[in-house]
Amino acid sequence: MKKRGVGMGCMWYGVGNTGLPNPAAAFVEVHSDGSVTVLTGAADIGQGSDTVMCQIVAEALGVHYEDVSVLSADSGVTPESGASSASRQTYISGNACLNAANMAKETIVKVAAELLGTTASNVELRDRRAFDKNNTDNHILYSKVLMTMKQKGIIAVGSGSFNPDTTGLNPENLEGSPYGTYAFATQIVEVEVDTETGEVDVIKIIAAHDVGTAINKQNVEGQIEGGALMGVGYALLEEIELDNGKIKNPNFTSYLINTAMDTPKIYPIIVEEHSETGPFGAKGVGEPTLIPTAPAILSAIEDAIGIRFNEVPVTPEKIIKSLKNGGK
């Protein structure tokens, strides 16, 4: 007999290292042809941080995405940005890139103000142009500003760093302020449990994640979908087998993970609760995407067959054994 159930999992997650110094740095140069080079130590391991850094710098400088080139994670030339862990790169390295871009922007704005006949505080850079905010008909091409800078021997470069304002945790009561910002999420999962075979089929996952301002919504949705699938593996499949301290399944022929063919329907929902300290309000979306999945699946299994499991993975063998033992 196949029985269906629905479960929900919720979580909050502190972005970055817990109560520790957590800095990142970046360099930005705007070239005379309008192209921009960004140097950041943030390693893009597939999560799309190069794309996000590029978008942040382009937005700050008022140029297009394709104008910006990012060189990342080359320890010979890029500055320290810390590890790509703790869901920290968009928030921390993103802020470093934004600060570096803003320093370069100050140089460009001063020259643009002279050309526009206004003050630097009235200059806005967008769409490859410099505008007088008090009179938007008064504008000038970015290339004209940069040509003027070249003639004057002025170079637009910037360096920036960011270290979130945190404190360590009190060892006695664990009070403190260990993170600069927090992400929140809720996932709802529907499963179907076969009471004869013990197999659990995850039908669909609805995943709502507060990521602050989504710098790149397609990237965020991809992270949510990938993280949720990892959560399914954590709940139902993945297990390191040990024998006297030796791992018995050290490769992917014996340590199985879900594939694209195993992916349930996943409906990512982006919640944009602005972060006061994030670059353009962004937070982070790495680990938070997989954390609520397993609790939601275990709750859904309980809803389907009335048995609460407190250990993962919940394999078919464990389900059949518990059903035969009356839920024990």
Image: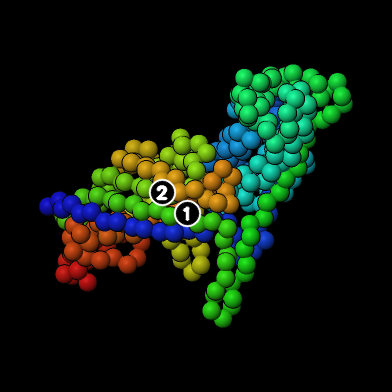
Residue 142 is tagged as none
Quarter where residue 143 is shown: top right
Residue 209 is tagged as 2
Q: Is residue 315 visible?
A: no
Q: Where is residue 269 shown, x and y percent of the image?
A: 37, 43
Q: Quadrant of the C terminus?
A: bottom left
Callout 1–callout 2 Cβ contact below 8 Å: yes
Q: Where is residue 169 shown, x and y percent of the image?
A: 59, 72
**Residue at the (62%, 19%) spot, across then down:** 137
Q: Does residue 71 lie above or below 240 as drawn?
A: above
Q: Amino acid at mark 1?
A: Ala
Q: Nearer the viewer, residue 308 or 91?
A: 91
Q: Nearer the viewer, residue 86 or 308?
A: 86
Q: Nearer the viewer, residue 292 or 183?
A: 183
Relative placement, left or right, of 2 versus 6 is left
Q: Is residue 191 visible?
A: yes
**Residue at the (53%, 41%) spot, across then down:** 47
**Residue at the (68%, 33%) spot, across then down:** 122
Q: Amino acid at mark 2?
A: His
Q: Does residue 261 lie above or below 145 as drawn?
A: below
Work out whether mark 1 precedes mark 2 in sequence or the reverse, and give the earlier one: 1
Relative placement, left or right, of 222 versus 306 is right
Q: Mark 1 Cα within 10 Å, few/some/many (few <14, many 20+)?
A: many
Residue bearing the label numbered 1 = 183
In this view, which residue lies farthest toward the left?
Answer: 1
Q: How many marks?
A: 2
**Residue at the (86%, 20%) spot, across then down:** 151
Q: Alpha carbon of mark 1 to alpha carbon of mark 2: how far?
A: 8 Å
Label 1: element kind: strand
Q: Nearer the viewer, residue 93 or 311?
A: 93
Q: Mark 2 Cα within 10 Å, few/some/many (few <14, many 20+)?
A: many
Relative placement, left or right, of 73 versus 280 is right
